[in-house]
Image: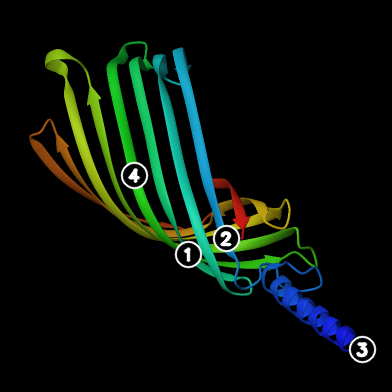
Amino acid sequence: MAKRTILAILVALWAIVGASAQERFSRNLNSQTFVPKGQWVTGVNVSYSQSDNDNYQFFIVEGINGDTYSFSVTPMACYMFQDDLGVGGRFGYERSRYKFDSADLIIDSDTDYSNENFYCINQEYSAMGVFRNYIGIGSSKRFGFFNEVRLKFGVGQSKLTNGTGSDFTGTFEKSYSVGIGVMPGLVMFLNNYSAIELSVGVLGFDYSHTKQTNDQIHIANRNTKNANFRINLFSISFGVAFYL
């Protein structure tokens, strides 16, 4: 009898411990919670594009010869301090390059401009604080919406050169930016721990300061303020997230 009692107590304790762990980290199908408190959300957004042009024509620009590419990566980590509410951060890096050996701007039959050896490269580092909240779609635990508020600080630089020999010109820019934005999106769970995300920018405020040096002689400054109250199709982002 004593052995049976001890065994029953051990089984009960094991059930309580297992249920506690499952309640903390499992996305219970019978709960209205979409992402439970205590989980870590990690992920990354990556994009890359490249193009090569051989005597390409685009509207009034003809004879385009050159290549371009752009690349960005944004890892993210977020802690769920309450059910469906989380805070965290992102780090972003973007780099792009435009290299055109030749291009002709044709305005009319008597007016055209030729451009040779155009080269531009720019890159930006950014750090973002993020706040996320999730909303499940009905009773589904596979599909849901999320909204992410971002506070961003960025530092960037770019270099532009054009021409050769006595016609060579070069411009260097360094910029600082700060902004806040809203990025709602859709999340689809592949299993209990991984998901695919799609997000788009709908609201944002940005301020940037740029210092420009042309031919190492002329110095200029530019301040830019921008407010966006519409869906920005150019900010559509795909990513993969892991829920640990």
Count of labels in the image = 4
Q: Report the residue marked by disc 4.
A: 124
The quadrant of the image that shows the C terminus is bottom right
**Residue 134, which numbered label?**
none
Q: CA distance from mark 1 to mark 4?
A: 21 Å
- Which quadrant of the structure image shows residue 72? top left
Q: In the image, is 11 to the left or to the right of 58?
A: right
Residue depth check, mark 2 versus mark 3: number of the one nearer the observer: 3
Q: CA distance from mark 4 to mark 2?
A: 25 Å
Q: Secondary structure at mark 1?
A: strand
Q: Report the residue marked by disc 3.
A: 1
- Which quadrant of the structure image shows residue 1? bottom right
Q: Is residue 182 above or below residue 57?
A: below
Q: Is residue 225 visible?
A: yes
Q: CA distance from mark 4 to mark 3?
A: 72 Å
**Residue 41, which numbered label?**
2
Q: Residue at x 34, y 44 (%)?
A: 124
Of the image marks 1 and 2, the number of the one nearer the N terminus:
2
Q: Residues within 10 Å of mark 4 (few under 14, many from 20)?
A: some
Of the image marks 4 and 2, the number of the one nearer the N terminus:
2
Q: CA distance from mark 3 to mark 1?
A: 53 Å
Of the image marks 3 and 1, the number of the one nearer the N terminus:
3
Q: Are marks 1 and 2 in contact (CB under 8 Å)?
A: yes
Q: Report the residue marked by disc 1.
A: 88
Locate residue 8, reporting x and y percent: 86, 83
Q: Residue at x 58, y 47 (%)?
A: 239
Q: Are marks 2 and 3 in contact (CB under 8 Å)?
A: no
Q: CA distance from mark 2 to mark 3?
A: 48 Å
Q: Is residue 139 above or below residue 110?
A: below
Specify the amino acid type for callout 4.
Glu
Specify the amino acid type for callout 1.
Gly
